[in-house]
Image (cartoon, rainbow, N blue to C red):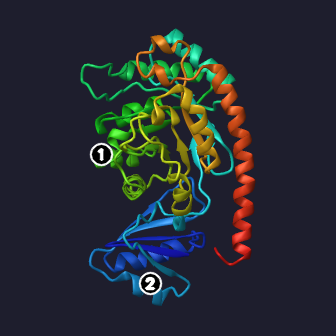
């Protein structure tokens, strides 16, 4: 068991917190004036208690009374999002599971349009290897005059179609007031790049308990991105997936610059699954496959891809959408790269451990 200290909040965590031990530990903490909330993290094997300690110096006291505990301080880094908080993490999206042991393909239209097109796309992406359907109903755009999405009507349609094909869904929520309604109609909430540091929204989706796909803001550092994830986790929701979708740099050749180096950095720093969106990251259909394969080779756990049957007629970002044939080919190639990279990563890790480097 270990407990993690963040200013005036302790996170007591460990597989050794048994049902028999927990009441006594909580009672002792409450007697010292602390507020204790058990966090029901469904994707972790460890039990976690959140302790608001006010001005009490509980760290040294707990160390004396529970000598088997180890005190870890935050050192300015996120706690619940850090790798030391959990070594084996799973995120459940309907019947699908995102983890570091299998590659997940999430695909669908950038925007939900009409029933016929959505059914065609859903059938096609499922046949081409996708296990989660993506689709935007709320579309925050740079211009207020651009297509803003089909909103709740679109979500209802997506929910209906996804049930027909038995696929879980992910869709964006942009307003804290809509979290409950969107949660009722989709299996996973997406936080888009523009809302990556909308802290009231992050807290609200954390309280919802729904799985969350957290995109990196195009101006966010990795530290800021992990800090955003911490807002969700601190509400007791550990079902968080990080999505690299490109950052804004001086390079105009692509829509954004996909930061492939962020993937191994995140793998070292956090237990949260990492997926990559090469569609929005590059903004160019002819670059999606190459960047996707590079991301998988770097250690990505999944891909988020735009697909459309008639990209020239798409209401949003048709220029970056793959066809079903292209998606099927990419899925096959990505799986082969994933398996090869996984063997290479395991072998490298074993060599480093044998050499005493890790």
- Residue at the spot x=44%, y=66% of the render? 79
Left/right placement of residue 288 relative to residue 136 reads: right
Location of the N terminus by quadrant is bottom right
Residue 253 position within the rendered picture, expressed as x and y whole percent measured from the top left: 43, 34
Q: Is residue 306 above or below residue 252?
A: above
Q: Is residue 232 above or below residue 61?
A: above
Alpha carbons under labels 1 and 2: distance apart: 35 Å
Disc sitting over residue 208 in the figure:
none
Q: Which residue is mark 1?
A: 198
Question: How many residues crowd around disc 2 within 10 Å: few (fewer than 14), some, or many (20 or more)?
Answer: some
- Residue at the spot x=60%, y=28% of the render? 167
Residue 195 seen in the current view: yes
Q: Is residue 81 above or below residue 168?
A: below
Residue 94 seen in the current view: no
The furthest residue to the left: 144
1 vs 2, front mark: 1
Left/right placement of residue 203 relative to residue 144 reads: right
Q: Which residue is mark 2?
A: 62
Which picture quadrant has residue 112? top left
Front one among 195 and 90: 195
Residue 80 position within the rendered picture, expressed as x and y whole percent measured from the top left: 46, 62
Location of the C terminus by quadrant is bottom right
Left/right placement of residue 159 relative to residue 5 reads: right
Could you tell me how many numbered marks the image carries?
Answer: 2
- Residue at the spot x=60%, y=33% of the render? 289
SS of the residue under disc 2: helix
């Amino acid at each position: 068991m270990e407990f993690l200290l963040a200013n005036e909040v302790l996170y007591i965590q460990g597989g050794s917190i048994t049902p028999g031990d927990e009441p006594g530990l909580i009672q002792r903490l409450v007697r010292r004036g602390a507020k204790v909330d058990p966090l029901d993290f469904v994707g972790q094997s460890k039990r976690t208690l959140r302790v608001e300690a006010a001005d009490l110096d509980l760290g040294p006291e707990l160390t004396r009374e529970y000598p088997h505990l180890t005190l870890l301080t935050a050192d300015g880094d996120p706690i619940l999002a850090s790798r030391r908080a959990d070594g084996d993490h799973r995120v459940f999206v309907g019947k699908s599971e995102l983890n570091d042991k299998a590659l997940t393909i999430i695909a669908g239209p950038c925007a939900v349009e009409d029933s016929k097109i959505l059914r065609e796309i859903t059938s096609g992406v499922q046949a081409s290897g996708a296990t989660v359907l993506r689709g935007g109903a709320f579309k925050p755009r740079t211009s207020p005059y651009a297509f803003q999405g089909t909103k709740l009507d679109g979500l209802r349609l997506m929910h209906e179609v996804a049930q027909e094909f038995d696929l879980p869904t992910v869709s964006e929520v942009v307003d804290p007031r809509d979290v409950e309604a969107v949660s009722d109609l989709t299996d996973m909430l997406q936080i888009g790049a523009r809302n990556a540091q909308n802290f009231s929204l992050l807290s609200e989706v954390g309280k919802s308990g729904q799985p969350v796909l957290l995109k990196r803001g195009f101006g966010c550092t990795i530290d800021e991105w992990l800090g955003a994830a911490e807002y969700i986790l601190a509400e007791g929701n550990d079902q968080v997936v990080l999505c690299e979708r490109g950052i804004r740099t001086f390079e105009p050749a692509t829509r954004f610059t996909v930061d492939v180096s962020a993937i191994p950095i995140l793998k070292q720093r956090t237990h949260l699954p990492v997926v990559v969106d090469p569609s929005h990251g590059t903004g160019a259909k002819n670059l999606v496959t190459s960047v996707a394969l590079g991301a998988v080779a770097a250690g990505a756990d999944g891909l988020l891809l735009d697909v459309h049957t008639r990209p020239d007629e798409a209401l949003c970002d048709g220029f970056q959408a793959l066809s079903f044939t292209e998606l099927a080919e990419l899925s096959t190639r990505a799986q082969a790269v994933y398996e090869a990279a996984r063997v290479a990563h395991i072998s490298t890790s074993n060599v480093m451990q044998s050499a005493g480097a890790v």
